[in-house]
Image: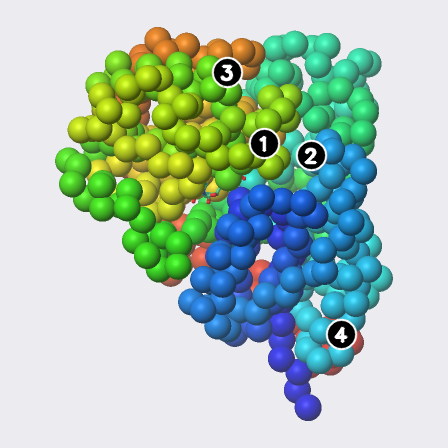
């Protein structure tokens, strides 16, 4: 009996990883593969209800995509985010092995696609002799950084933090201030070790898919393809198949259209600035008040997603929080005074649908890569306000390479003032040059995914590689 050709996708924790993996799943389904997304649950998490509702909506909208939830594992000891994440994946490896073994007996697995943060599962995939791929859900520039990082670190005498804002040189990138690197790689220790373990596993895969399009990041893609990022080692094929972004067509949870979209319907074209900081970003009450002050004084219409502050400000994301009343978080009378021209939404808005709305003309963003691609695909210029992980580096690429963003200053340490928020929001909403450059970038993004476009061709090349007869199947 001929077995179904299937692809297994394994995203890491967090909506920012799950959303693009679903988009990737749809592409494989379109090419005739049977697709299963393996879902890892965060041991203790307040985001699981968002994940639950996402999976239930995706399952009913795309019945040909299966979801398999791995049994929950015990919480790892370390609370350091990257260590916690890597450990969770490692602890789930036995469950993954069981699942893949049973799948292998009933289907012809053509690829197991891992998120980079699931790289600890590469051993499982290799043990089962299955083709392994990574889906890199950040930019090509960040992939270049990750791959080159072990080389860079071996050349440095001290820690990256000691270099302050001195420029670091990575193949295919503009100079990056050392202080813009993710904090977890700046100093030796457990987090650095965990990150490095991911980086060195990347070239072991049979191929790496990147959620980008080549013409957005020409120099970085060239450095990857040339092997400049892994001097002395072999570089697997790289496939730029993006931009893969959330399909914002439903515009809300469970098919209900979110009330903020109805509010946007009533606003003039490109008049609204949208503020949203990813699935995990949040600010102190003091920062929320400064932001509100700047926003109010800018005089712009706004839609702002506000999340209550983290319990422990030292860990700015992904920790349980209690929802505070919006009135307690914002300056007194702010909601009342701005009622005519602003809307504040608590915790979550259907971002892709918001950005695609004709009324939105600017996006204040933490520069997460999915948010960046969603803005690009909607042609909405960005005011970059990075918070954690690789977001400061994305801001450098957006401001200096693609030139589709302006940057907020002062977010490195301490507070961004209301003055800065006001000035930069005005610049964001008033700069015609910025809007034109973003509109041109959008055109290129759309063209990339059309028939004959650069990303469509890269995907075809990958699918052809996956369909090749293997000695095991002889098929
Ligand atoms: N998102 C959303 N509504 C929110 C916050 C986030 O729909 O209120 C989505 C957003 O559209 C994007 C993802 O969550 O697809 C966030 O991914 P990103 O890579 O930008 O940031 P992360 O959450 O990983 O920091």
- Say few, some or many: other residues with alpha carbon within 10 Å of mark 3 (under 14 / 14 to 19 / 20 or more): some
Mark 3 touches mark 2? (CB < 8 Å): no
Question: Separation of disc 3 and disc 4 at Cα?
Answer: 49 Å
Mark 1 touches mark 4? (CB < 8 Å): no
- Say few, some or many: other residues with alpha carbon within 10 Å of mark 1 (under 14 / 14 to 19 / 20 or more): many
- Say few, some or many: other residues with alpha carbon within 10 Å of mark 2 (under 14 / 14 to 19 / 20 or more): some
Q: Mark on residue 317?
A: 1
Q: Quadrant of residue 358?
A: top left
Q: Circle 3 is placed at which residue position?
A: 411
Name the foreground residue: 337 vs 33: 337
Q: Circle 4 is placed at which residue position?
A: 102
Work out which residue is located at the far bottom of the displayed protein and give it: 1
Question: Separation of disc 1 and disc 4 at Cα?
Answer: 36 Å
Q: Earlier in the sequence, mark 3 or mark 2?
A: 2
Secondary structure category for the residue under label 1: loop
Q: Earlier in the sequence, mark 1 or mark 3?
A: 1
Question: Separation of disc 1 and disc 3 at Cα?
Answer: 16 Å
Residue located at (64% from left, 21% from top): 314
Mark 1: is the Cβ under 8 angstroms from ligand 1? yes
Question: Separation of disc 2 and disc 1 at Cα?
Answer: 9 Å
Residue located at (62% from left, 75% from top): 5
Q: Circle 2 is placed at which residue position?
A: 81
Q: Is residue 333 left or right of residue 190?
A: left
Expressed as whole percent of the image width and height from the top left, the position of residue 126 reads 81, 59
Q: Nearer the viewer, mark 3 or mark 2?
A: 2
Expressed as whole percent of the image width and height from the top left, the position of residue 336 reads 24, 24
Q: Earlier in the sequence, mark 2 or mark 1?
A: 2
Secondary structure category for the residue under label 3: loop
Question: Separation of disc 4 and disc 2 at Cα?
Answer: 31 Å
């Amino acid at each position: 009996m001929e077995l179904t050709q299937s692809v297994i996708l394994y995203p890491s924790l967090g909506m920012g990883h799950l959303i693009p993996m679903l988009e990737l799943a749809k592409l494989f389904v379109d090419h005739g593969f049977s697709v299963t997304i393996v879902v890892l649950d965060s041991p203790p998490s307040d985001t699981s209800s968002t994940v639950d509702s996402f999976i239930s909506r995706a399952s009913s909208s795309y019945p040909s995509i299966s979801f398999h939830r791995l049994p929950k594992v015990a919480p790892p000891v370390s609370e350091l985010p990257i260590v916690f994440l890597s450990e969770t994946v490692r602890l789930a490896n036995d469950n993954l092995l069981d699942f893949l073994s049973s799948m292998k007996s009933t289907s012809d697995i053509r690829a197991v696609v891992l998120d980079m943060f699931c790289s600890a599962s590469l051993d499982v995939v290799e043990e089962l002799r299955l083709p392994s791929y990574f889906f890199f859900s950040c930019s090509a520039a960040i992939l270049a950084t990750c791959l080159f990082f072990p080389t860079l670190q071996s050349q440095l005498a001290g820690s990256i933090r000691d270099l302050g804002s001195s420029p670091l040189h990575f193949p295919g990138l503009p100079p990056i201030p050392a202080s813009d690197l993710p904090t977890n790689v700046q100093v030796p220790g457990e987090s650095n070790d965990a990150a490095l373990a991911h980086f060195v596993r990347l070239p072991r895969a049979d191929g790496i898919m990147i959620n980008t399009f080549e013409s957005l990041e020409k120099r970085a893609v060239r450095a990857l393809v040339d092997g400049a990022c892994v001097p002395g080692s072999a570089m697997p094929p790289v496939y730029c198949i993006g931009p893969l972004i959330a399909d914002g067509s439903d515009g809300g949870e469970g098919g209900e259209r979110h009330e903020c979209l109805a509010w946007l319907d009533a606003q003039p074209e490109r008049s609204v600035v949208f503020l949203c900081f990813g699935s995990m970003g949040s600010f102190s009450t003091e920062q929320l008040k400064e932001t509100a002050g700047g926003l109010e004084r800018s005089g712009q219409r706004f839609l702002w997603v506000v999340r209550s502050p983290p319990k422990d400000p030292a860990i700015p994301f992904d920790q349980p929080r209690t929802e505070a009343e919006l009135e307690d978080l914002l300056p007194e009378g702010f909601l009342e005074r701005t009622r005519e021209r602003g809307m504040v939404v608590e915790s979550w808005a259907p971002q892709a649908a918001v950005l695609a709305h004709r009324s939105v003309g600017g996006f204040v963003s933490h520069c997460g890569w999915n948010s960046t691609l969603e803005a690009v695909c909607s042609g909405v210029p960005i005011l970059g306000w990075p918070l954690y992980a690789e977001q400061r580096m994305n801001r450098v690429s957006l401001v200096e390479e693609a030139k589709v963003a302006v940057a907020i200053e002062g977010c490195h340490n301490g507070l961004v003032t209301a003055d800065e928020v006001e000035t930069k929001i005005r610049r964001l909403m008033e700069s015609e040059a910025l809007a034109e450059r973003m509109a041109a970038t959008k055109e290129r993004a759309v063209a990339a995914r059309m028939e004959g476009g650069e990303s469509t061709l890269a995907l075809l090349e990958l699918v052809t590689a996956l369909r090749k007869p293997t000695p095991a199947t002889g098929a």
